[in-house]
Image (cartoon, grey):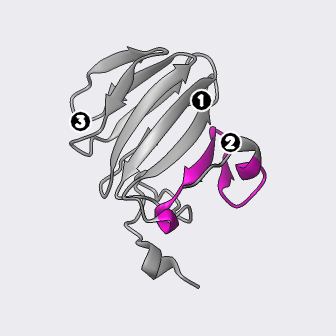
Amino acid sequence: MIVRSLDEISETDADIKTENWRSRRIVLAKEKVGFSFHETVLYAGTESTFWYANHVELVHCIEGEAELTNEETGEKHIITPGTLYLLNGHEKHTVRPKTDFRVLCVFNPPVTGREVHDENGVYPLVVEEDAAV
């Protein structure tokens, strides 16, 4: 059994910060449970485009409000607490938070925590065995 708090993750290498967002990776590939789980805050007034070509992501909003745009279709959605979106088709998408936007995210396959978005917003597919040092 794993019991972990956000306080344990904060200010470690599992606490990823950018100008647009902060993501605390709570469960990663190294736990070998088949998914990763993150708490992410995207900051009000920013715009972030992502494309998880190698992962399926589920995003559940627990605080704030954002506009979500499917870049493939142009379809827009307002995401508020209690709403989730599932990128089951690996859709390229843009998130525009109107307020700080706090979400819980599940990735499959799990991320290792070492991935960095490339110029297209894509995470490379890295498996834990590949990431071992």
Quadrant where the image shows the C terminus: bottom right
Residue 85 placement (x, y as % from top left): 34, 28
For residue 109, which numbered disc appears in the image? none
- Specify whether 113 is left or right of 6: left
Quadrant where the image shows the N terminus: bottom right
Please name the residue shown 49% across and 56% down the image: 117
For residue 72, which numbered disc appears in the image? 3
* Cα distance between the residues tagged 3 and 2: 25 Å
Labels 1 and 3: the sequence-earlier one: 1
**Which residue, as the protein is rendered here, is positioned at the far front?**
1
Give the residue at mark 1: 46
- Specify whether 131 is left or right of 72: right
Asked if 108 appears above or below 70 in the picture, the reply is below
Please name the residue shown 42% across and 33% down the image: 59
Labels 3 and 2: the sequence-earlier one: 2
For label 1, the crowd category at 10 Å Cα-Cα, with few meaning under 14, some 14 to 19 and many 20 or more, is: some
User: Which range is magenta?
Assistant: 8-31
Check disc 2 and report its element: helix, strand or loop: loop
Is residue 86 something one can see in this rendering? yes
Q: Amino acid at mark 1?
A: Thr
Check disc 1 and report its element: helix, strand or loop: loop
Asked if 48 appears above or below 63 in the picture, the reply is below
Give the residue at mark 2: 19
- Specify whether 33 is left or right of 55: right
